[in-house]
Amino acid sequence: MLLIENFINGSYCAPLDSTYLDNVNPATGIVISKIPRSNKKDIDLAVQSAQAAFPNWSASSQESRFLILNKIAEGIESHLNELALAETNDTGKAISHSRQIDIPRAASNFRFFATAAMQFASESHDMPKRAINYTLRQPIGIVGCISPWNLPLYLFTWKIAPALATGNCVIAKPSELSPTTAFLLGKICKEAGLPDGVLNIIQGYGTEVGEAIIQHPDIKAISFTGGTKTGKHIATQVASKFKKLSLELGGKNPCLVFADCDYEQTLKQVVRLAFSNSGQICLCGSRILIEERIYEQFKKDFIAKVDKMLPSDPLDPDCKMGSLISNEHLNKVLNYIELAKEEGGSILSGGTQIKLSGRCEGGSFIKPCVIEGLGPDCRTNMEEIFGPVVTLQSFKTDEQALELANCSQYGLASSIWTTNLNRAHRLAEQIQTGIVWINCWLLRDLRTPFGGLNNSGVGREGGYEAMRFFTEPKNICINYNSNL
Ligand code: NAD
């Protein structure tokens, strides 16, 4: 059985207390590896190694960081098969998803921020005939990066790459449910020439080792992606320590379908945005709002497609939908479906646990679920389920659509499906989400600001937003007028 280790000061090592956790493959229910149950002592050691590495790394040239980050990208690509298999075995997601989306995107993250290191410029502010200001954007020091299980290496590297590109040293923690690709990344970074101590990868429970990261006085910034409840806890903990904080949290994303949409294309894309990665993407649409004129037809056609979707063995190359992340999460999703019934909802498709035979007989599979008959302010439509569960609601006017869309404590992403671009622009301006997709979903340009409002988080990732987050601006004012 694979024994996963921490990666500290450029070497793999056991947790100092020699305690381990089981890592279960959710598609089979079988323990596939042991992972370190690290704690504060391991974080202290990692911080020491990061402190030793910081002076040289922060003073290294942009070009040398660019070259190393690019090599890491190449290393990820050359280990595509190994990484994709690890991702699928940890999470139960379809192998095609790991191969075509998760791992290639992890490589793109490094390549993108390698070039950002070369292009990132600071500002200058001129005071005519008097003085000039210029801003230095200096690395913060040691930063903590904490990521979730749904897109493991994809989101882990989305934080680490800009932190390294800007000259910081990093203490990074993947989810305890998806440890393996983060573990493998250590070796890839070493082979790419990343100096020892610059990136330290520590495994274990959020409440233990994650907590040690956010509490550590020498870790000056925290970049966190995960649940809203955890984000709220972290925000309260780090506020009094004055750490820089970026929070990318949950969502309850609306999808607005208008009668004048490109019907076939919309139908296909709504199925995709609802159920990709078994609905376990923070950007998935879970509240499908349909214009009344086409509601019945769209519902019928949508259900016909969803009825055909069956989860299967994620290692099957033709698998479109694998398992959920864990049995515990499966039960949470099933409980929400029961709640939807209690709240008066009708199940139009799926929503039941699926038992596969053979290798996957112990796996956590569920048939995607479509619910109708619920108003906007019931718990089913207010709380994040984070599984393959969507509700359908109808609207008559643009105003009603907007009201339904904005009836949420979350504000991460939305999508609008219409051929009327005036309407699309008008609604996009008024919808309360950090990201609005018009006639598309998950079309990502890594330069754009990424993040949400309200319970979906604070701050933005992506492009120069991330480069700014991971740097401390310092203004320098030079007077050149001797008459001052
Ligand atoms: P989670 O909050 O349970 O865990 C996220 C990470 O935080 C894990 O590594 C976990 O170990 C760690 N953690 C837990 N408690 C901690 C603590 N007290 N201190 C420090 N770290 C701690 O979330 P999850 O279940 O892994 O992920 C699912 C959630 O993530 C969903 O809500 C989803 O919407 C959200 N998500 C958001 C985005 C985004 O970009 N907005 C992207 C992906 C996932």
Image (tube, rainbow, N blue to C red):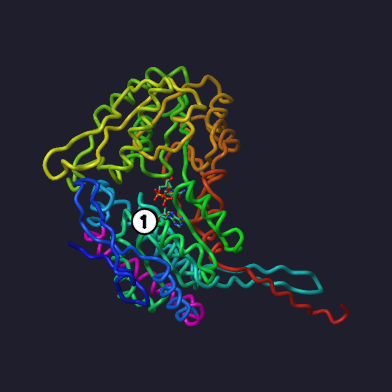
- Mark 1 lies on a secondary structure that is loop
Q: In the figure, 179 relative to 277: above or below?
A: below
How many numbered badges does the structure rendering display?
1
Image point (56%, 24%), residue name: 400
* Residue 296 visible in the snapshot: yes
Location of residue 38 by image quarter: bottom left
Q: Which of 220/282 is in front?
A: 220
Q: What residue is pinned by disc 1? A: 175
Residue 180 among magenta residues: no
Would residue 283 be found to the left or right of residue 127 on screen?
Answer: left
Three-letter amino acid code at the position of disc 1 = Ser
Image point (51%, 61%), residue name: 222
In the picture, which quadrant includes the C terminus?
A: bottom right
Disc 1 packing (10 Å; few <14; some 14–19; many ≥20): many
| Residue found at the far right of this picture | 483
In x, y percent, where is residue 348?
A: 33, 22
Q: What range is drawn magenta here?
A: 55-83
Location of residue 374 by image quarter: top left
